[in-house]
Amino acid sequence: MREIVHLQAGQCGNQIGAKFWEIISEEHGIDPTGVYRGTSDLQLERISVYYNEASVATAENGGKYVPRGILLDLEPGTMDAVRSGAYGQLFRPDNFVFGQSGAGNNWAKGHYTEGAELVDAVLDVVRKECENCDCLQGFQLTHSLGGGTGSGMGTLLISKIREEYPDRIMNTYSVVPSPKVSDTVVEPYNAVLSIHQLVENTDETYCIDNEALYDICYRTLKLSNPTYGDLNHLVSLTMSGVTTCLRFPGQLNADLRKLAVNMVPFPRLHFFMPGFAPLTSRGSQQYRALTVPELTQQMFDAKNMMAACDPRHGRYLTVAAIFRGRMSMKEVDEQMLHNMSKPR
């Protein structure tokens, strides 16, 4: 089967990554201990893309599945939080790789000093996971570009993996800093140094921006005081959405390479801006089913973009629209054609 090795680096990367595993475990019917409790064969059909099978199903319960995820950080705090969280028992204990010093929001510490000391230990775990794969399709990394570990060590890891697996796809979910929502004064430096690496060494990068996420929380979800938990919920929903075509049977973009072929017009232009519809806040629910035109209109709306960039000020080079659930292909095709023929 076509496996993906998932890596999460730094505080932001680990928090988003942990949320991503919670959501896709629910979708695939896997409980917090890793046991399959699902009800549909579709949940298991392509489960090996993200999970290793640890034990075979018995009469009493389904098989046990372990995420093919590697968690790394230069300080133990976030790892301990993930390990003691709801789905902490899901991960393989050997796949937690952490230092003690921290990177102090310094890209060079993550890339050249502290991170460089830890990177060989991470690569050993990566090799182990890759050797267990039948047919590895590529890697995905969740990280932020504003800190020290996710940006510095994350990009170091990408370049090392690129050296060792040059023909595999490298996909990242990168949280880009923004001036309105800034934690530290050095975020722009860390981001510039990281993007230079991402341009050269990744095949697909989903740009996620805290400013856009806060705007969605304020304007669309009407949350007066959004927390990082609310933001991470939005990011993990988006990640679950864009990986749907990799995890479930579908018509298009069934693996990372096909997605790259369809989406990347020039090798260095591989930075995607995800949009998501319908948007709901944590713990809330929808009260009516949306039609395909409504979904499409919302999905292309600037307010629903996960990066603070107004698509009305430019042109789309490529678009991939992923719809989930029961819907008429004819209606979807008509909507897409209608959108393409809209005057700019």
Image (cartoon, rainbow, N blue to C red):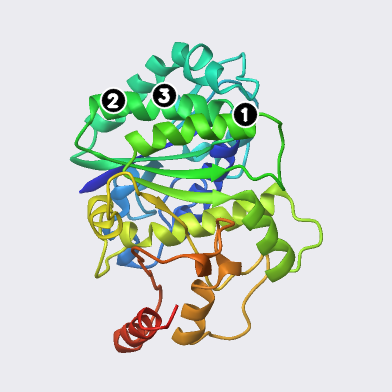
Q: Residue at x 38, y 57 (%)?
A: 243
Q: Is residue 178 left or right of residue 235?
A: right
Q: Whole-percent x and y of residue 180?
A: 72, 48
Q: Whole-percent x and y of residue 193?
A: 49, 29
Q: Residue at x 31, y 43 (%)?
A: 4
How far apart marks 1 and 3 lie (CA) works out to 24 Å
Q: Earlier in the sequence, mark 2 or mark 3?
A: 2
Label 1 neighbourhood size at 10 Å, few (<14), some (14-19), many (20+)? Answer: few
Q: Earlier in the sequence, mark 2 or mark 1?
A: 1
Q: Residue at x 58, y 33 (%)?
A: 83
The quadrant where residue 59 appears = bottom left
Quadrant showing the C terminus: bottom left
Asked if residue 9 is positioned above or below residue 273 in the image, the reply reads above
- Kindly state the secondary structure of the residue where label 1 is placed: helix
The residue pinned by badge 3 equals 156
The circle on residue 127 is 2
Work out whether residue 327 or residue 321 is closer to the camera in this orientation and state it: 321
Q: Earlier in the sequence, mark 1 or mark 3?
A: 1
What amino acid is at disc 2?
A: Arg
Decide if residue 32 is in sight here: yes
Work out whether residue 240 or residue 145 is closer to the camera in this orientation and state it: 145
How far apart marks 2 and 3 lie (CA) works out to 16 Å
How far apart marks 2 and 1 lie (CA) works out to 24 Å
The circle on residue 80 is 1
Asked if residue 76 is positioned above or below residue 83 in the image, the reply reads above
Work out whether residue 284 or residue 177 is closer to the camera in this orientation and state it: 177
- Kindly state the secondary structure of the residue where label 3 is placed: helix
